[in-house]
Amino acid sequence: MPILFLPVHVMEFFGLLGGGQKDAGLDGSGRPVAQLAVLPGLTHYNISSSPTLATAVNPFLEAPVCRQ
């Protein structure tokens, strides 16, 4: 039986990392460093072979490091 993560639990975890807790502002300066990507239709079996993963991850990896 696969382990499922309910979206509400993922969002709660995102919130614990500081995501979605305040308005980011028009310029994005209030955006937290936490990020969340949901890739619908993928599982731990097929995510590594999906081009959707690279599309979601590359901008994160290429962004400058921002330390708070």
Image (cartoon, grey):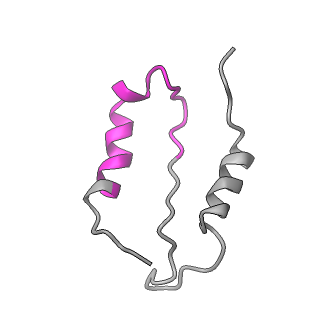
> Most extreme residue toward the top, as rendered?
1
Q: Nearer the viewer, residue 3 or 53?
A: 3
Which image quadrant is residue 65 in?
bottom left
Give the extent of the magenta segment: 38-60
| Position above or below: 36 against 4 | below
Q: Position of residue 22 (x, y in %)?
A: 64, 78
Could you tell me how many numbered marks the image carries?
Answer: 0
Left or right relative to 64: residue 19: right
Q: Does the magenta run of residues contain 40?
A: yes
Quadrant location of the N terminus?
A: top right
Quadrant location of the C terminus?
A: bottom left
Q: Position of residue 35 (x, y in %)?
A: 49, 59
* Residue under the point 63% across and 68% down: 20
Left or right relative to 59: residue 17: right
Q: Position of residue 8 (x, y in %)?
A: 74, 48
| Position above or below: 60 against 22 | above
Q: Does the magenta run of residues contain 64?
A: no
* Residue under the point 36% across and 73% down: 66
Q: Position of residue 19 (x, y in %)?
A: 59, 66
